[in-house]
Image: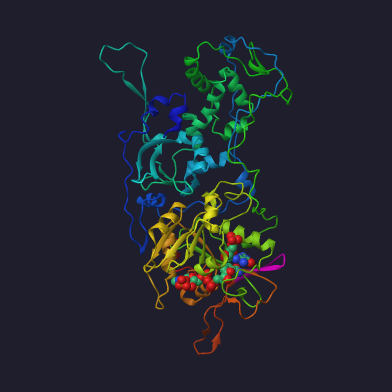
Amino acid sequence: MDHASNASGSSEEASDSEAGSPRNGFVQVEDVLRTDRGVGLVHTQTQKDAMDDDRPQPEATPINLSGALNKQALRGDETDSSQLRTTTDSNEANSSNAPTTFNAKTPSLFNNPPNLARIRKVLFECNDPIEISLEEFETYWPFIDNVWVKQRSNASKEGHCTTDYYMCRLRRPTHRTSETRPLPEGKRPRKKRVREGGICNFQIKVVRFEGAYSTVTIARTPGSCSVHSHDLDYIDRVKRNSGLMEYARKESVKGYLPSSIYTKFQEEPDKLCEAGGRFFTVTDVRNISAKWRIQNPEVNLIPHEGYEYQKGHGIVKTQSTDGVNEVPSQPKPTPSISSSSLPPDTLSFPQFSLDFLQPYLPNNSERREFPHVTLSYASSMDSKISLQPGMQTVLSGPEAKLMTHYLRSRHDAILVGVGTVLADNPGLNCRLEGAGGFGGLGRMWQPRPVIIDPMGRWPVHPECRMLRTAVDGKGKAPWVVVSPGAQINPQTLMMLKGYGGDFLRIVEFNQHWRLRWEAIFRALASEGIKSVMIEGGGTVLSELLNPEYTSFIDSIVVTVAPTYLGRGGVNVSPDSKQDPGGAPNAALNPREVKWMPLGQNVIMCGKIRPSARPEEAQRD
Ligand SMILES: NC(=O)C1=CN([C@@H]2O[C@H](COP(=O)(O)OP(=O)(O)OC[C@H]3O[C@@H](n4cnc5c(N)ncnc54)[C@H](OP(=O)(O)O)[C@@H]3O)[C@@H](O)[C@H]2O)C=CC1
Ligand SMILES: Nc1nc(O)c(N)c(N[C@@H]2O[C@H](COP(=O)(O)O)[C@@H](O)[C@H]2O)n1
């Protein structure tokens, strides 16, 4: 699929028709076999497996809201209309005998999906693997398809997983066929090279997985360079995207003059730029319009209602268009992903400062062997996190809950033990307004739930919260960490994969036959996870606070509630410790501690990891 070659009428079109050909003379993306790092996804062909076929570069991480979850970043658009032109096109206007005295409001030509400028940038840069719903992909891809030329396509045997490989348009030379002089019989026209190839070696693959929740994952391929050698404007100048051209086509088939269409585009410069149309020309509209006119030669093209051709000025607006006599035949555009109808469980973005958290949060620019790990849970005054095992207990007030969701937005994964999942049936997504599924793009910016379930005790069921959340596009399906002994029924496996989740097998144990956290963290890192927020429960947290593991824990953020839950509650408490003389000693003292009141709670932040591990200190 190369949307651009379908809709575009720009000069690049002829050369783009070969975009889908696997034999286009360029180096194909090599499949790289995964290295076995003590972890294996249980194998069936899914989107995730397809992504694994050529394991992304070590720094690859699924995109989340890290560093971006504020309203400006999620909703703001970066557009610049300074280079927009106006048009006069007397030839076309002269050919018109259109009525010019309507007094009507003509609706916008644009139907840009939310955050288009930002999403175009994300899909251009592909800094990290991007996971979005199929619907989101189909909404946004047409607005960025001008960047890409398809190289080849693979489909799984079952047909529910397709991988398309694309290269940056500037990697391929462009030719134009010379049609100016008559050619001797039997001679084919010579192609003139209009652009050298190899300007940019950026390559991506787009993996579509059709399941209970159909997803598309976009990631750089191993042979790709890490950044384009040019900016997005450069491509927008070279080639129009098909989303933009579709706007023009829709107007053209209504019989409007290209210059009138173009004039109307120019009246909304922000939307035009947002859609990638900074370099849009009246010729682009004419090319699109010409195709329709060939099939409809009898139609006299007209200007839009309220516009007319004026000699020396081109198409100009003649009537106020402030809502009088609205034309019923042209329905108001509705964005395909609406941010106005927020789900009822949406949490408003915290209106209070959370700056105090910053030193304890992951720093995504840091290159690390293991993910940044934050322990974050709510505790009573007597260090209990629930009234009794298997019982969910609310300890966070409304403000602390918002903070927890903010923390979720800043991590790639949320990890809990199976005890917590069985007790709480949690969603483990970020429900702040502006997050994916809550007014923002779907799962792309949601953290990945991870469940430690060595024996596979969690009954995977379509009605459980995490899978419902995934189906609703409000979170990701979980990865379940199992031990080699776990019996995973093939139907369960397929069901979880169908929701976009997976099983990860860990084969390393400590001396107590517990899964080694080092292996778990390494497995997550190898799956692209750069930061993990560990929420519980008691067993998981207590174990991780033991000396064996503290070197893997970066920060702790504890919400303290003004209550005592009593002795029967679930404890968070590491093993006791003695000093070298055998006297009892504190088990662990967090460093750089900060206390911050938040509503009825107090938030305690601290750092755990004593100092950078030597091998990491070198790398950082
Ligand atoms: N207030 C808060 O912030 C929170 C409270 N909670 C509460 O905590 C309670 C649950 O805590 P808890 O019962 O301790 O359960 P956990 O969620 O800690 O899960 C414990 C189980 O996870 C598996 N597991 C964990 N670590 C390992 C490892 N290293 N190797 C192998 N298996 C491992 C084991 O499964 P197996 O038994 O199959 O071997 C273990 O029994 C619930 O009541 C919940 O509401 C939970 C989260 C946050
Ligand atoms: N921060 C915090 N405060 C509390 O009072 C809690 N009970 C918890 N529990 C954790 O949150 C999970 C529920 O998540 P969803 O709201 O369902 O997404 C629960 O499983 C615990 O991990 N946390």
Q: Which residues are magenta?
A: 592-609
Q: Residue 527 at x, y = what percent?
A: 42, 57
Magenta-colored segment: predominant secondary structure: strand
Q: Residue 141 at x, y = what percent?
A: 49, 38
Residue 179 drawn above or below residue 76? above
Residue under the image location 55 percent in, 73 percent down: 538
Residue 106 drawn above or below residue 549? above
Q: Residue 115 at x, y = what percent?
A: 59, 41
Question: Can you tell which quarter of the image residue 312 is in?
Answer: top right
Residue under the image location 50 percent in, 90 percent down: 582
Q: Is residue 69 left or right of residue 372?
A: right
Residue under the image location 51 percent in, 35 percent down: 143
Question: Can you tell which quarter of the image residue 381 is in?
Answer: bottom right
Residue 114 part of the magenta-drawn span? no
Residue 602 part of the magenta-drawn span? yes
Question: Can you tell which quarter of the image residue 533 is in?
Answer: bottom right
